[in-house]
Amino acid sequence: MPGNNASSIFEFRGIKDLYFAEVLKDDESEYKTSTPKRLSYTASIAKEVETSSETKFYDNQPMIVINTKGAETFTLTVAPPALGILAEITGQAFDPSLGMMIEGEIKPKMFAIGYKAKGTDGFWRFVWKYKGQFAVPSETVNTESNSIDTNNTELTYTAVSTVHKFAYTDAVNSSSSTPTTKTASGVVVDERYGQMTEDLKTDWCTEVQTPEKVKAAINGAA
């Protein structure tokens, strides 16, 4: 296990293990997903966060700033997924006996996605987003030529917060060490802090990792 390298300077240079899992239940009592599957091999992942900010004035002075966070939109550049996987994540019909996807009516479902991002310092960040939908991707296919240019697939995944509230401790924004319960859109664990176990790194994509599961795994209670 590496020591504490949290203050190391790095840039992202590497991405792997993009997985997805269907959200089977998300309510006050439980958050539950299917067993994760590999989505495809990944070239890049880009994230945009919808935010808004408003300043409130009192006595002609700006006194309060109200900030809100909305949906997160991910652009996943991947090798073209298997047709059955593409049908599953976009809610389209698929007949595996024929290898045939029927493009038409869409029955969208919610999915979690997970992946690993590597830094130039050799350490990794491990990510799970808990709830979101995939859009049907646009596709470009060019004629063959002497060029080496090819086309991949860009998937758009929009993440939102869960209904279910997870228990976790917020040591930055709270003076209390008592766990609170809040909704979440996902979790990011950085191995630079030296807390991740080898088992958690290995098992990251075998199930959707919630704050409680990560804590249990690191504390040896998994």
Image (cartoon, rainbow, N blue to C red):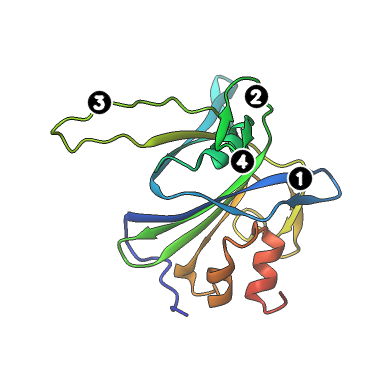
Residue nearest the viewer, comparing 219 with 149: 149
3D distance between C-alphas at marks 3 and 2: 29 Å
Q: Residue at x 35, y 56 (%)?
A: 14
Disc 2 marks a residue whose amino acid type is Ile
Disc 3 marks a residue whose amino acid type is Thr
Q: Position of residue 140 (x, y in %)?
A: 35, 25
Q: Residue at x 57, y 40 (%)?
A: 84
Residue nearest the viewer, comparing 186 with 143: 143
Q: Position of residue 35 (x, y in %)?
A: 67, 56
Q: Residues within 10 Å of mark 2 (few under 14, many from 20)?
A: few
Q: Position of residue 139 (x, y in %)?
A: 40, 26
3D distance between C-alphas at marks 4 and 2: 20 Å
Dot 1 or dot 4, earlier in sequence: 1
Q: Residues within 10 Å of mark 3 (few under 14, many from 20)?
A: few
Disc 4 marks a residue whose amino acid type is Ser
Residue 97 occupies quadrant = top right
